Image (tube, rainbow, N blue to C red):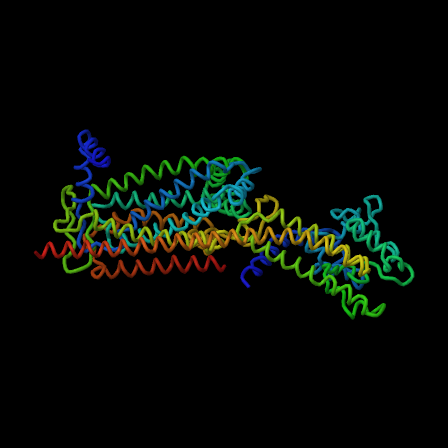
């Protein structure tokens, strides 16, 4: 449990300044003093994945977050609240791959005809981190039968577990000074490709593309295995050196004692 | 005739090598009741030599520049063959040296070995201790991580509490208003050249004092230690044990056990001396919460927090260190046996408990 807790602490150290910076925006200062739905974002956003990554109000809604007068001015790029049909394009500015897959899916085709958009599954200000947990009977069952979604979830389960496992392994290796940036980048890229698949809502596509993603992850797993094998080798060598030094120490003490005893005998004689 | 003997004969003819070796090894007698604490000097010499050797090897690849320092350390740790080993030995070795220095000082204190005629030995040893701490402080900045950057910012900021010259002192230490390229440059120069040179000179002085005055007799056992002489006199130990091979074996054993401690740190607990913030490159615009100094500076860190003003904390630290440096002159009585110095022994353990207590408080504060 030691390494996950250290990793979380590290993450918190990294993210706290981002959170503090976002809460200093004029959007936050003004809306936190309002009532009802206008204040809701200030309560929901701090626990979101966006807050965790330092994505603040103005990053989505535009405007000048440093100036009360210009905060909601179209002249400073303020976009306001998107209509329901505009939401995918609104979010897709930062998530273009996901937008592409969503638009090609049955979900995307049903947009405007009762079909779901980004916020239907992910929430709006309390945006949840994309994970398999979002595919569940309660959420999917709001619109349709869960059986098909369950099949998709099952097809993705193994890859998801592999990504989570690799992220944890890389965090542990980083903690002992191993350069993991390259491998983290590979996992991040594979994870992004994987998360795009969530939105195709097509089990055939999921199965086809998951294979390619798993191959990418396998490359990283192999690198992690190589690093861990090297670390094990180091420990074996280290253990050997420690054993040797202990032996030298003990022999030197025995030798010291024998010299003392010889010296005492010589003195007595 | 074998080659070794021929070389010794050749040197003996020109330098009197056999005489030197006899005087300093086989005929150099130590007290019979000499204890294990006396081996710490040899342990420290070995550890300092190891720091020197690993430091030189690190210099080959380390780049003292804010743009490249962190990356160069990462490269040493990950790409250079055995770079991780060299760097870990250097980083963990620094902690083991401070531990050995503290134990050496505490043993000398407890046995009263700092007393006349060994005042200069104590003072030079105390300077060595402070130079070692300065080496640790300057070395801390070199990896240019978040930890090193902000710990140095906090440490150098402390100098600002000195009245009148505080601000100028901070600027002198940093080479500017903030920790930056100039700070890295001067800390690097001090760490690899200025301080090792000073340490080498003072260490030589310390060893000279030890050899010249002779090894002090432990103040335990039935025979009380001799009274300090009125005139200079090398303390002889007739009937004692030869330094070589008798005591060298004991030195070797304790050195081996300290190296075990070092290798356990290097191979099995690499994260113990490298906190998470040491693995993130320095970012002057992002202050990580809870930056704390290394364990041996925690007492100083917490002392500054206890007192209402930093200056008061700094003054008390200064007074404590000055008192310790001048102890042989303040505690000038000839008695060295702990059993006959209850006040001193009480102060010793109280001071030790205070040091440990304040350090633990600093760790959890």
Residue at the extreme front = B1
Q: Please tell me which residue lies in front, B23 or B332.
A: B23
Q: How many marks?
A: 0
Where residue B310 sits in the image (x, y, percent)? 47, 50
Name the residue located 84 percent from the left edge and 43 percent from the top edge. A75
Q: Quadrant of the N terminus of chain A?
A: bottom right
Left or right: B310 with respect to B328? Answer: right
Is residue B245 visible in the rendered structure shown here? yes
Query: Along the horizontal axis of the image, is A160 left or right of B124?
Result: right
The answer to which image quadrant residue A165 occupies is bottom right
Question: Outermost residue toward the left?
Answer: A269
Q: Is residue B105 visible?
A: no
Work out which quarter of the rendered image holds the C terminus of chain A and state it.
bottom left
Residue lying at 92% horizontally and 61% vertically, measured from the top left: A113
Tell me: residue B77, above or below residue A109.
above
Q: Position of residue A183 (x, y in %)?
A: 63, 49
Judging depth in this view, the residue of B168 and B179 nearest the camera is: B179
Place of residue A88 in the rendered image (x, y in percent of width and height, measured from the top left): 84, 54
Residue B316: % across, % down: 39, 51
Closer-to-camera residue (B1/B175):
B1
The residue lying at 56 percent from left, 56 percent from top is A172
Q: Nearer the viewer, residue B314 or A189?
A: A189
């Amino acid at each position: 449990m030691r390494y996950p807790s250290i990793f979380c602490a590290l993450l918190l150290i990294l993210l706290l300044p981002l959170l503090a910076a976002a809460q200093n925006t004029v959007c936050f200062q003004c809306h936190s003093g309002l009532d009802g739905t206008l204040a809701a974002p200030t309560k929901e956003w701090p626990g979101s994945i966006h807050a965790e990554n330092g994505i603040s109000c103005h990053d989505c809604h535009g405007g000048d977050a440093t100036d009360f007068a210009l905060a909601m001015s179209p002249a400073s790029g303020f976009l306001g609240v998107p209509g329901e049909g505009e939401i995918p394009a609104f979010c897709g500015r930062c998530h273009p791959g996901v937008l592409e897959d969503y638009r090609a899916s049955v979900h995307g085709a049903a947009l405007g005809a009762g079909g779901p958009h980004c916020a239907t599954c992910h929430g709006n200000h309390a945006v949840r981190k994309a994970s398999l947990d979002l595919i569940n009977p309660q959420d999917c069952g709001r619109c349709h039968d869960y059986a098909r979604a369950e099949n998709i979830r099952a097809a993705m389960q193994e890859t998801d577990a592999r990504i989570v496992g690799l992220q944890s392994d890389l965090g542990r290796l980083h903690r002992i000074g191993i350069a993991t940036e390259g491998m983290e980048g590979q996992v991040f890229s594979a994870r992004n490709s994987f998360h795009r698949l969530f939105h195709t809502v097509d089990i055939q596509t999921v199965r086809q593309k998951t294979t390619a993603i798993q191959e990418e992850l396998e490359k990283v797993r192999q690198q992690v295995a190589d690093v861990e094998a090297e670390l094990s080798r180091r420990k074996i060598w280290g253990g050997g050196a420690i054993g040797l030094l202990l032996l030298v120490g003990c022999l030197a003490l025995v030798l010291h004692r024998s010299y003392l005893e010889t010296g005492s005998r010589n003195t007595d004689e | 005739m074998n080659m070794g003997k021929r070389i010794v004969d050749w040197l003996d003819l020109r330098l009197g090598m056999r005489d030197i070796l006899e005087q300093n090894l086989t005929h150099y007698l130590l007290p019979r009741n000499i204890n294990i604490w006396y081996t710490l000097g040899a342990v420290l010499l070995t550890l300092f030599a190891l720091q020197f050797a690993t430091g030189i090897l690190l210099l080959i690849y380390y780049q003292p520049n804010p743009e490249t320092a962190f990356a160069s350390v990462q490269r040493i740790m990950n790409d250079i063959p055995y770079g991780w080993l060299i760097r870990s030995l250097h980083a963990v070795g620094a902690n083991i040296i401070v531990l050995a220095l503290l134990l050496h000082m505490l043993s000398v204190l407890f046995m009263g070995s700092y007393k006349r005629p060994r005042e200069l030995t104590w003072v030079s040893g105390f300077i060595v201790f402070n130079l070692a701490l300065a080496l640790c402080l300057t070395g801390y900045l070199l990896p240019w991580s978040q930890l090193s950057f902000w710990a140095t910012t906090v440490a150098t900021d402390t100098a600002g509490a000195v009245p009148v010259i505080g601000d100028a002192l901070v600027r002198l230490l940093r080479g500017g208003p903030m920790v930056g390229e100039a700070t890295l440059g001067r800390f690097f120069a001090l760490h690899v050249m200025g301080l090792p040179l000073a340490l080498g000179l003072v260490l030589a002085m310390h060893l000279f004092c030890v050899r010249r005055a002779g090894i002090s007799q432990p103040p335990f056992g039935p025979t009380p230690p001799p009274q300090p002489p009125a005139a200079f006199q090398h303390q002889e130990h007739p009937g004692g044990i030869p330094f070589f091979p008798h005591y060298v074996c004991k030195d070797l054993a304790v050195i081996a056990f300290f190296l075990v401690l070092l290798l356990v740190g290097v191979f099995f607990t690499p994260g113990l001396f490298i906190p998470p913030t040491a693995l993130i490159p320095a970012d002057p615009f992002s202050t990580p919460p809870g930056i704390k100094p290394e364990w041996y500076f925690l007492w100083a860190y917490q002392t500054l927090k206890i007192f209402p003003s930093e200056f008061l904390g700094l003054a008390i630290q200064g007074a404590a260190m000055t008192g310790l440096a001048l102890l042989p002159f303040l505690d000038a009585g000839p008695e060295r046996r702990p059993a006959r110095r209850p006040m001193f022994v009480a102060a010793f353990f109280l001071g030790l408990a205070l040091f440990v207590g304040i350090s633990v408080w600093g760790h959890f504060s």
